[in-house]
Image (cartoon, rainbow, N blue to C red):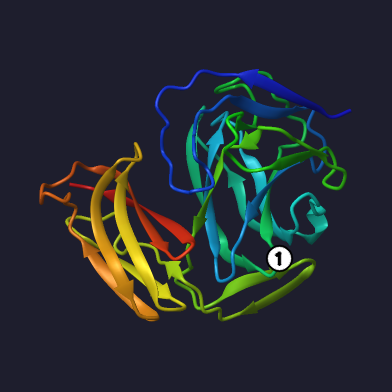
Amino acid sequence: MLLCVFILVNLCGGNMVFAEEVSSTDISGVIGLRPVEENSCIAVWIPMQEGQVLTGILWYNNDESIAFPEILLESGTLGKPVTLSECLTVAENVEGLSLGWSEIQFNTPVACLSDGLYILFRFPEGSEYTEGGIGGGAGLGYTTSGSGYPGWISGNGQDWVGFCGEVGFAVQPVYSESSEPEVVLKSGSDDLSGPTVVTALFPATPNPFNPSTTLKFSLKNESFVELSIFNIAGQVVGNLISERYPAGQHEVNWTGRDDRGRKVASGVYFARMKAGALIMTQRMVLVQ
């Protein structure tokens, strides 16, 4: 029998916000599974808009000593999780921090023809969730503040139990585009691969960088673009762009300085681009 375990944990810091859908990162606790059988998993539904490409996620992880064997994606409609046999594997042996925000870039960028994508975390068979933190087993953070994304738990990858009310999983999508000319376009159980014209923020190059890096972006249509730099605490460091751009390819250089021209400290930063209704982020590392 599948048992969902809720354990409240205290969290210091962790106020990073980069997707409008996640209005708060106040973690209420961690959701894990006990016992974990073959194909036990959690599915989180992420809404997708036309032209968006999903290249990775940030998620609040429980135990750094336990790896998720697979992270999978499938196109679908809210409230109707899919089976594992229909899914595309986008990452394997995924590890994160203990009781901390973690990040993974998918090995394949994915778009879809439906309203959204299901992100499935497959749990290691035979493991079980016992407590919060290192040694406590695989688990995902959740919120009860009305933020986060809807999710479901399954013991076999086919039969699902959903969460309702104010519970949402602490997952944040990273929308962008791979440097490769193709993405995988998911349409239910059908896969189509081909070039896709999208509004996207490309990975910074070089990365890590010193003293500067280039951020390239593409626009499917003419749009008003805002491109800003945030530190890991979610604070605005600099505003690089705030103007209308024509459709096509564009780029901007960041020299590792704030709006006052001062050099910022070494560390992790996030570029956040808003173009119309789309919001995309890219992670960068500055090494002085």
Residue 189 located left or right of residue 165: right
Q: Is residue 75 above or below residue 83?
A: below
Q: Secondary structure at mark 1?
A: loop
Whether residue 214 appears in this view of the structure is no
Please state, as top left, top right, bottom left or bottom right, where the N terminus lies in the image: top right
Residue 165 located left or right of residue 142: right
Looking at the image, which is closer to me, 139 or 134? Answer: 139
Please give the name of the residue rendered at 57% of the width and 42% of the height, measured from the top-left corner: 171
Q: Is residue 166 above or below residue 208?
A: above
Q: Position of residue 73 (x, y in %)?
A: 68, 57
Quadrant of the rendered structure where residue 12 is? top left
Looking at the image, which is closer to me, 244 or 193? Answer: 244
Residue 46 located left or right of residue 127: left
Please give the name of the residue rendered at 69% of the width and 68% of the height, measured from the top-left corner: 186
Looking at the image, which is closer to me, 75 or 98? Answer: 75
Q: Position of residue 250 (x, y in %)?
A: 32, 75
**How crowded is the residue under tag 1: few (<14 C-alpha within 10 Å), some, or many (20+)?**
some
Please give the name of the residue rendered at 40% of the width and 66% of the height, measured from the top-left corner: 202
Residue matched to label 1: 114
Q: Position of residue 120 (x, y in %)?
A: 69, 48
Kind of residue indicated by mark 1: Ser
Q: Position of residue 31 (x, y in %)?
A: 67, 29
